[in-house]
Image (cartoon, rainbow, N blue to C red):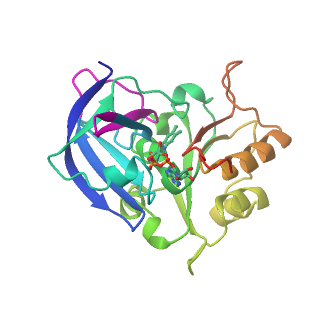
Amino acid sequence: MPFTEQRVISIRKWSDKTFSFTTTRPDDFQFENGQFVTVGLRHNGKLIARAYSIVSTNDVDYLEFLSIHVPDGPFTSLLVNVREGEGVLINSKPTGSLTLKYIQPGRNLYLLSTGTGLAPFVCLIRDPEVYQHYEKVILVHTVRTQGELAYRDEINALTNDRLLYVPTVTREPFETTERVTDLFRSGTLFSKLALPAADPAHDRVMLCGNPHMLLEMRAYLEANGWTMTNYKGVGNFTVEKAFVLHDGG
Ligand SMILES: Cc1cc2nc3c(=O)[nH]c(=O)nc-3n(C[C@H](O)[C@H](O)[C@H](O)COP(=O)(O)OP(=O)(O)OC[C@H]3O[C@@H](n4cnc5c(N)ncnc54)[C@H](O)[C@@H]3O)c2cc1C
């Protein structure tokens, strides 16, 4: 049986569209920080399951997830009604390409995200090992409204000279309103942080966000001398979709 039933321990609402929840951790469930796993619910006798990045690090005894609420979404319209103490199903096989194994060590590590694409990066910035591989870790998170800046206080509390955090909000007045893609491509990100421009010879990039952001960033990076991790080898950037578009868009 690849799924085991786990109990929801806590739920935290960030905005109308986003919330986090923690569950018990299945016995013998091992994962690498940055991976995702399939989470399921039973509805009318059928299993509905979706991929979810794990926000909690692998040294704690619970699992934590950050979720969107898609109105009419088959899975999240059920998940949003699950209460503390109730069950969710967790698959036994985590996977994913946003782990330290899938990216070369280097100078600065850029974690570029939109929306719930933040989830694997919250896990990584909590992991002390990440700071052994890179001098600085730069987390950029783009959302539409301030309420969607999940984990903002916790991330701010973790920031120091090794972890830099750049939240950006595109549809409300905010200190930074450019999209992550534009900040990186224009170089504004580097001047803002007083860092040398990202260089494929020294720096590394992890991307997790909406499919359009990933396409744009991948095209830009590949046109500028960066190499993506794939079956041929570990490159200086690695990518994971934060979700898949089901409308053909
Ligand atoms: C590798 C991977 C990791 C993922 N990790 C997460 C995660 O950590 N948290 C999370 O909330 N979702 C994550 N997802 C998306 C998740 O699997 C589901 O799509 C999501 O839970 C919505 O399920 P649904 O059945 O309600 O809607 P679906 O039928 O799955 O999606 C309907 C539509 O909603 C939109 N949508 C779906 N998910 C999102 C999202 N996360 N943000 C914005 N728009 C979305 C898309 O336009 C999609 O076409 C991940 C997906 C993949 C492939």
Residue 171 placement, left or right of 119: right
Farthest residue, direction left: 85
Q: Is residue 69 above or below residue 25?
A: below
Farthest residue, direction right: 223
* Residue 43 within the magenta-colored segment of the rendering: yes
Q: Position of residue 58 (x, y in %)?
A: 33, 32
Q: Is residue 183 above or below residue 113?
A: below
Q: Position of residue 220 (x, y in %)?
A: 80, 47
Q: Position of residue 240 (x, y in %)?
A: 59, 38
Residue 148 placement, left or right of 19: right
Q: What is the count of numbered marks?
A: 0
Q: Is residue 159 above or below residue 44?
A: below
Residue at 58% x, 27% y is 102
The quadrant of the picture occupied by the N terminus is top left
Residue 41 placement, left or right of 207: left
Farthest residue, direction bottom: 173
Q: Position of residue 239 (x, y in %)?
A: 63, 38
User: 120 or 70: which is nearer to us?
Assistant: 70
* Residue 148 within the magenta-colored segment of the rendering: no
Residue at 44% x, 40% y is 53
User: 245 or 134: which is nearer to us?
Assistant: 245
Residue 1 placement, left or right of 32: left
Observer able to see residue 162: no
**Residue 170's image quarter?**
bottom right
Observer able to see residue 23: yes
Residue extent of the magenta highlight: 25-46
